[in-house]
Amino acid sequence: MAASTSALRRGIRAHVETWRPYTTCYPAMIGSAGAALAGGTWGVQVIAAVVVPTLGWLSGHYLGDYFDRELDAIDKSQRPIPSGRLSARTAVVCGVACAVAATVLTLLVNWHALVLVVVATGGIVAYSRFCKARGLSGNLVRGALTALALAVGALLAADRLPWTIAVFALVLLLHDAASNLVGTMRDVEGDRAGGYRSVPVRSGIRTAVRMSFGLYAAAMLIVLGAADFVPDPTGYYLLAALAACAGTAAFSLLFEHVDDLPPRKALQAHKILVAERLVLTAALIAGGAGAWIALAVLVPALVFSLSTQAALRTGHEFPPPMEQRKATLP
């Protein structure tokens, strides 16, 4: 009985680690932002705008871990699949189940959004299977998936897409391409060993930092220039400025260590960006639905994201010392 209970706990923890709970508020907020900018009001459609991108996000984590299982086995053997706590087959089944659930919910609420959901699902597979290992193009595809999530949220909550969604979708494409590129800076040795040709592997950390900062700066310039496109620019401006301050802190850390960037410093910068993107998304929500609603969404999302990141992130990214690893092996 004790053995089965322990196995169940290990299995549940493996799924939770795969979800990366510190990231799950982000797609939910992206969907909310799309709904707010499209003029959606509270109801089933807005709930779907939150749930569908989140299911797509979870699908991407399951399928991404499946496609990365051989790479993770090289220097991240503590992760669920290479450690044997989650089977590759289970990861595929769960990833497909999340994608199917997102598709069915889309059909029930607004079938007009189905094309976007199908394209996003295909993009998840393409990114995980092919694009992730191909440098900047992979980072841009990753950013495009977030842009699609915004459009899905908007179309689920409204009968049509307002043209302004294209502006903010471009912001998210550039922003998440930058964040995704920062995320590759902690994995240089593992990516090189696994044959992944990320920007840091191909061109070095200095080029990667400059490139990611250029993408981020372009995104924030568009954000600051787009205040005329939102009904409530005051809360939008304030939260966008706060996001820019957090982004500046993250990139200051990267530039400080650009000649010798330890993986844990790279992870620290990305942790800041995980919180920063929640603030940026809250700015979009504020622009469409008002500052108070944005804050009511942002505060619990930040608390949850920061607390789960503190508890789980480092162990997910870096294997424990050898003696600890031996002690925790099943």
Image: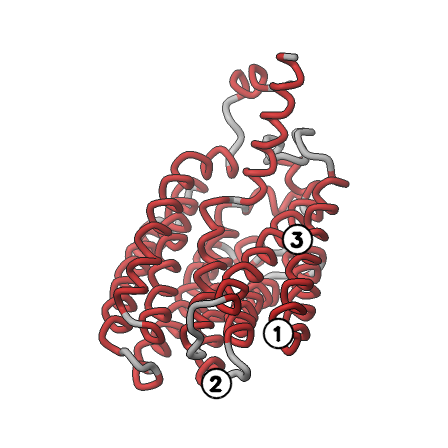
* Disc with the residue nearer the chain's start (2 vs 1): 1
Determine which residue is flagged by label 1.
Answer: 110
Mark 2 secondary-structure assignment: loop
Q: Position of residue 167 (x, y in %)?
A: 44, 81
230 with respect to 309 (left or right)? left
- The answer to which quarter of the image holds residue 51 is bottom right
Q: How is the image coloured?
A: secondary structure
Q: Nearer the viewer, residue 186 or 26?
A: 26
User: Which quarter of the picture shows residue 236?
Assistant: bottom left
Marked residue nearer the N-terminal end (3 or 2): 3
Q: Is 310 situated left or right of 31 in this image? A: left
Task: Single out the residue that lies furthest toward the top.
Answer: 2
C-alpha gap between disc 3 and disc 2? 28 Å
* Camera-side residue of 276 and 260: 276
Q: Position of residue 106 (x, y in %)?
A: 63, 67
Which residue in the structure is indicated by mark 3? 98
Using the image, determine if residue 268 lies above or below residue 164.
above
The residue type indicated by label 2 comes to: Pro
Three-letter amino acid code of the residue under disc 3: Cys
Instruction: Give the number of callouts.
Output: 3
Tell me the crowding category of disc 3: few under 14, some 14 to 19, or many 20 or more residues within 10 angstroms, Cα based: many
Q: Alpha carbon of mark 2 to alpha carbon of mark 1: how far?
A: 16 Å
Is residue 261 rendered to the left or right of residue 240?
right
Identify which amino acid the numbered label 1 is placed on: Asn
Q: Which residue is mark 2?
A: 162
- Mark 2 crowd level (few <14, some 14–19, many ≥20, 10 Å Cα): some
Camera-near label (1 vs 3) is 1
